[in-house]
Image (spheres, rainbow, N blue to C red):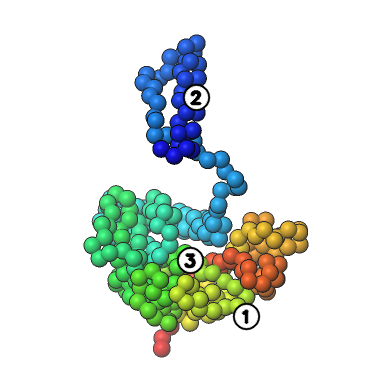
Amino acid sequence: MSNKKESDLNHIEADFERFMSSLEDSPALYLKIVELNDTSTYAPPMKAAPHVDWAYALQHRCLLRDFSNIVSHHREYFKSRGTYMERGPACLDIGSQHSFIIPLSVLANFYVLDAQFPDDVFNGYPSTGIIMLPGEAQKIPLKDKSMSIVTSMHAIEHFGLGRYGDSLDPHGDVRGVREVYRILTEGGIFIGSVPVVSKKRERVDFNRTRLYYPETFRRILMDCGFQVKYEEILCAPHAKFSSPDERSLTGEIYHTEIKKEEDIEKIEAVCGEGNEPDMVYYFIACREKYEKET
């Protein structure tokens, strides 16, 4: 036993004796058995505030807000359980954090597509409203016009870079967006996010990620046939946002509207060279209801 564990156990045993003696003059406990766990230790004190990935927290906040609004306007269609699960999900998620998407299945049934899933992945219980799908965004294993909503939070930038088990494809991001368009119903909704930087800093950071200027990714969406209905830039808090003027660039909850795209460069300047801020382009795009004749 290490010195720390032995010391902890000695203190825990002393605490246990005090705990038990305090019961002598107190009402009986609801739990009748009290045992000393001699493998327990003390939780270490926090040296700083708990880490929060603010870029993810802010984008998930937006997705929850907008997804719940959309579903609430079509409650019967998206109702998740029973015969609705038997006909299959109406929503697909590609590459988002599973721990966030799974709670959304309370509102609607989901396919969850991930290139890291093995081919024999257990696809979940129907009652959970989730079906796991192995596969990659560049070739989604679903029929044309079969999904009403597709979500992909902070994932598109990885398509085709091979980091998460998908095929190498320099145009993987564009092919993935085209595939989303293919499987969406007419009028279907695409909600997603990608990391953004200023125009002069956008790049492929192989094999980790792609970093876009918002205008560039907006053009990808439009070139693939989407109409962009809503967009904003979300910026995580940064230690160098010290003055009121600097904080105003990112707003009260550390985000700025898309109208101020030029502020990206100002925020980067505040953070300093080699210290890029964590910014996300969040969008809601729609497949046109009636395709134009070609």
Whether label 3 touches label 1, CB < 8 Å: no
Which of the two discs, 2 and 3, sits closer to the camera?
2
Horizontal side, residue 50 vs residue 178: left or right: right
Q: Position of residue 39 (x, y in %)?
A: 39, 34
Whether label 2 touches label 1, CB < 8 Å: no
Sequence-first tag of 2 and 1? 2
Measured in 3D between alpha carbons, the distance from the residue under mark 2 to the one under mark 1, in whole angstroms, is: 60 Å
Horizontal side, residue 42 vs residue 124: left or right: right
The residue wearing badge 2 is 15
Crowdedness near tag 3: few (<14), some (14–19) or many (≥20) residues, C-alpha within 10 Å: many
Measured in 3D between alpha carbons, the distance from the residue under mark 3 to the one under mark 1, in whole angstroms, is: 21 Å
The residue wearing badge 3 is 154
In the rendered structure, which amino acid carries the disc numbered 2? Asp
The residue wearing badge 1 is 200
Measured in 3D between alpha carbons, the distance from the residue under mark 2 to the one under mark 3, in whole angstroms, is: 47 Å
Horizontal side, residue 18 vs residue 33: left or right: right
Which of the two discs, 3 and 1, sits closer to the camera?
1
Q: Identify the element where label 2 is drawn.
A: helix
Which of the two residues, 275 or 225, is positioned nearer the viewer here? 275
For this orientation, the residue located farthest to the bottom is 294
Q: Is residue 105 above or below residue 279?
A: above
Q: Is residue 149 above or below residue 20?
A: below
Whether residue 180 is visible to the viewer of this picture, yes or no, is: no
Whether residue 203 is visible to the viewer of this picture, yes or no, is: yes
Q: Identify the element where label 3 is drawn.
A: loop
User: Residue drawn at (50%, 67%), measured in percent from left and top?
Assistant: 193
